[in-house]
Image (spheres, rainbow, N blue to C red):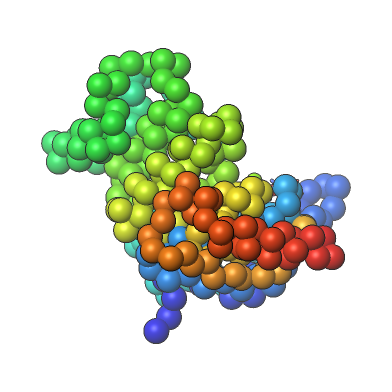
Amino acid sequence: MSSFLALNHVSFSYHSPQGELPAMTDVCLSIEKGEFISVVGPSGCGKSTLLSLICGLLPPEEGEILIEGLPPGASDVRIGYMLQRDHLFEWRNIFSNVCLGLEIQKTKDEESTAYTEQLLKTYGLEDFRQVRPSELSGGMRQRAALIRTMTLHPDLLLLDEPFSALDYQTRLEVCDDIATIIREAEKTAVLVTHDLSEAISFGDRVIVLSSRPARVKADIPISFDGMLSPLERRNSNAFYQYFNMIWEELKKDA
Ligand code: ADP
Ligand code: MG
C-alpha cells in the first residue's frame, strides 16, 4: 500500500540574483494516515521549506511529492497550516477571526457556522466569541488559530513551530492541548520545530534533519507505554533516553 504522504528524493534550491542556495537535498520520507511526525533540525536548515513543498507552495526541483498518490496541487486532501504567529486580526473579534477561512473559501453557511460554534465550545473559547485577540492569553490565541484551521476540515495539518512564540510554561500547556485536540480529531500531522523536547513529546516519529541543505539524518520511531499526553511523556524515563539518542544524532557532523 502506498503512503498517505510520500517525499521521494526531493531536492530544492532557492534562486536569487546573488546565486543559488540549496535548501534541501535528496529527502525521502513517508507518512501514514493518522501519524504524528515531528521534524527537528537546526534553525535555517530548511524545515519551513519542507512544509512549503508538502503543501505545494514550492515545487520540488528534483524528486516528487505525492499525497494519496497525487502531487499536492492535484490531490483532494485538505491541508491546514499553523504558524509560529497566530495571525489573528485585532479588528475582528474571536468569532469572526475563526470564521475567516470559511469566508475566504466562501463556505460559511449554517452548517459550517454550527461546526465552528461547536469547536469554540469544545476548546473552551465559547465565552470569548466577542472579544478581541489582545484580550486573550497567548495559549488561547493559539487555540483560536487552531480552530480557524480546523473549521476547514483539514486531513493533514502542517505545524510550523506553532509554540515557539509562547513563554515556556504556556508553551508546555499549549503543546499538550493542541496535540490532544489534533489526535482526538484523528488528523495526520507534521510538526516542525528546533526544540528537541517538543519533538519527542509530540510525535510518533522524530525525523532529524541535517543543517542546510537539509537531508534526513535519522528517522526514529517513538513509543511510550500507553497513550501519554505530551506533558506525561516529558515526565517518563523513556523521554530522557530518546532525548539523548536524538541529541547525539543532531550533533553528528552538524
Ligand atoms: P528553517 O525553517 O529550518 O529555519 P527555512 O526553510 O526557512 O529554514 O530556510 C532554509 C534556508 O533557506 C535558510 O538559509 C533561509 O535563509 C533560506 N531561505 C528561506 N526562504 C528563502 C527565500 N524565499 N529565498 C531565499 N532563501 C530563502
Ligand atoms: Mg522555519
105 left or right of 65 in image: left
Counting the numbered discs, the total is 0
Q: Position of residue 247 (x, y in %)?
A: 72, 59
Q: Residue 42: x percent and y percent?
A: 73, 52
For this view, does 34 lie left or right of residue 26? left
Residue with the most extreme left position: 110
| Front residue (pair 169, 63) | 169
The x, y position of residue 73, in whole percent, is 45, 61
Which residue: 38% across, 60% down?
227
Quadrant of the image occupied by residue 33: bottom left
Q: Is residue 228 visible?
A: yes
Farthest residue in the front direction? 237
Residue at 60% across / 50% down in the picture? Answer: 197
Quarter of the image that includes the N terminus: bottom left
| Image spot of residue 225 (x, y percent) | 43, 65
Q: Quadrant location of the C terminus?
A: bottom right
Q: Nearer the viewer, residue 235 or 50?
A: 235
Q: Determine the residue positioned at 50% across, 32% down.
A: 170
Quick check: 166 above or below 224? Answer: above
- The residue lying at 36 percent from left, 55 percent from top is 183
Query: Horizontally, is 95 left or right of 109 in the view?
Result: right
